[in-house]
Image (cartoon, rainbow, N blue to C red):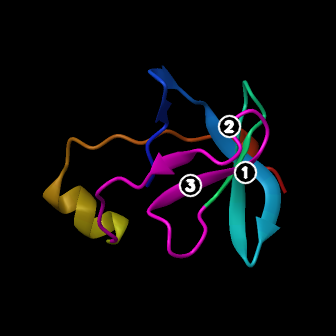
Amino acid sequence: MYSRELDGKTLNLAPSGWTYRQTFVLYDKKTETLWYPFPGTKGLTGISGPHRGRLLPELRSQKTRWKKWHREHPETRFMLYPELLRF
């Protein structure tokens, strides 16, 4: 997980539809900056657009399965993005 905060503004990140080395490239809907998690960096690096060369830091997180997470955190809610379900 990565921060979406940059210069006091919240970016609206979404999948770009592109992959590089089997990893999704994200983009900011407003600035169209592309973001990629280069190995060895602690975040997403802007690879094109107005934020090229900037870094969105990685946030503290943990990998787990939904069933386990929900059992331990039953108040958790999630958002469903219908546009990601199109085939």
Is the magenta region chiefly helix, strand or loop? loop
- Label 3 – label 1 distance at C-alpha: 25 Å
The kind of secondary structure element at disc 1 is helix
User: In the picture provided, is 45 more to the left or to the right than 70?
Assistant: right
Single out the mark in the foreground, 2 or 1.
2
Mark with earlier residue (2, 3): 3
- Residue type, numbered disc 2: His
The part of the chain drawn in magenta is 37-63
User: In the picture provided, is 47 more to the left or to the right than 57?
Assistant: right
The kind of secondary structure element at disc 3 is strand
Q: Is residue 47 above or below residue 41?
A: above
Q: How would you rate the neighbour count of disc 1 (Cα within 10 Å): few for under 14, some for 14-19, many for 20 or more?
A: few
User: Marks 2 and 3: CB-CB under 8 Å?
Assistant: no
- Residue type, numbered disc 1: Leu
Residue that mark 3 sits on: 44
The kind of secondary structure element at disc 2 is loop
| Numbered tag placed on residue 51 in the rendering | 2
| Numbered tag placed on residue 19 in the rendering | none
Residue that mark 1 sits on: 85
Single out the mark in the foreground, 2 or 3.
2
Q: How would you rate the neighbour count of disc 2 (Cα within 10 Å): few for under 14, some for 14-19, many for 20 or more?
A: some
> Which residue shows up at 43% across the image and 55% down it?
1
* Res 30 → quadrant: top right
> Which residue shows up at 32% across the image and 71% down it?
64
> Which residue shows up at 43% across the image and 43% down it?
3
User: In the picture provided, is 55 more to the left or to the right than 8?
Assistant: right
Q: How would you rate the neighbour count of disc 3 (Cα within 10 Å): few for under 14, some for 14-19, many for 20 or more?
A: many
Mark with earlier residue (2, 1): 2
